[in-house]
Image (cartoon, rainbow, N blue to C red):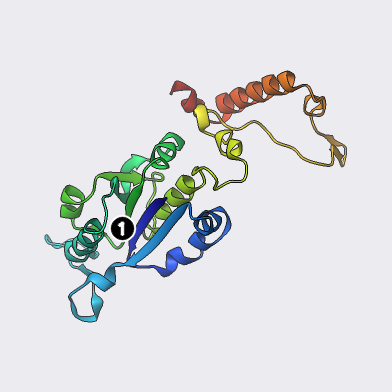
Amino acid sequence: MMRIDLLTVMPEALDSPLHCSIVQRAQDKGLVEIHVHNLRDYSTRKHRKVDDYPFGGDAGMVMQIEPVHRCIEQLKSERDYDDVIFTAPDGELFTQPMANELSLKQNLIILCGHYKGVDYRIREHLITREISIGDYVLTGGEIPAVVITDAIVRLIPGAIGDDQSALSDSFQDNLLEAPVYTRPAEYNGWRVPDVLLSGHAAMIDKWQMEQALERTRRLRPGLLKN
């Protein structure tokens, strides 16, 4: 069973996304354990504070190293972890191949950043991997942590009823997904491509590959360079 531990100062931001749809079903099936840890519980300061002013006089507040270190050390005393991930806008860009790789791990810690940032010693000494979901800044790392968790969990065998469905998603093999259709075959004069109604498996496969290549060239040509 995979285990994912999420470290945050805003556990309420993680509650709903982690308890619905595929992620909840994977937990119900015993395929993954997801635990949320409130870093305020590891603070020794008054009012459970976990942030302070930055040295050097810059604006904003910075997450302190002590509660993060105490939480990570507690978790590591209980089990071994494959990676300790930090969600950072300047981290390595999250991709489908990365999700595939992480889905094969056993135990992961994901630290959600907040405030102006985290004490850089956290990144230097406690983190093994830094991941960004895009070139923009969010209020906190909770949303990126949910994105990463969702992308990983849906790849665990058994999480999706049809495992082949995940393997044909966009970005697998660096291609966008071919268009998909369902009933009715005609609506408002708009028809489903005839090839999909033909029942000819080889022709359908060929059409889907052609469509995937065409859409990738048109919408995300950079993927083909990979």
Please report the residue visible at 56 percent of the width from the left and 39 percent of the height from the top.
166
Q: Position of residue 134 (x, y in %)?
A: 41, 44
Q: Residues within 10 Å of mark 1 (few under 14, many from 20)?
A: many
Numbered disc total: 1
Q: Is residue 220 left or right of residue 87?
A: right
Q: In the picture, residue 97 is in which quadrant?
A: top left
Q: Is residue 200 left or right of residue 94?
A: right
Q: Nearer the viewer, residue 45 or 120?
A: 45
Please report the residue visible at 19 percent of the width from the left and 54 percent of the height from the top.
122
Say if 196 sits above or below 113 in the image: above
Q: Nearer the viewer, residue 195 or 80?
A: 80
Which structural element holds mark 1? loop
Identify the residue at the far left of this view: 56
Q: Which residue is mark 1?
A: 113
Q: Is residue 191 left or right of residue 55?
A: right
Q: Position of residue 43 (x, y in %)?
A: 21, 72
Q: Is residue 51 left or right of residue 137?
A: left
Name the quadrant of the C terminus: top left
Q: Position of residue 173 (x, y in %)?
A: 51, 27
Say if 22 sits above or below 51 in the image: above
Q: Position of residue 58 (x, y in %)?
A: 18, 61
Say if 196 sits above or below 165 in the image: above
Q: Amino acid at mark 1?
A: Gly
Please report the residue visible at 49 percent of the width from the left and 44 percent of the height from the top.
156
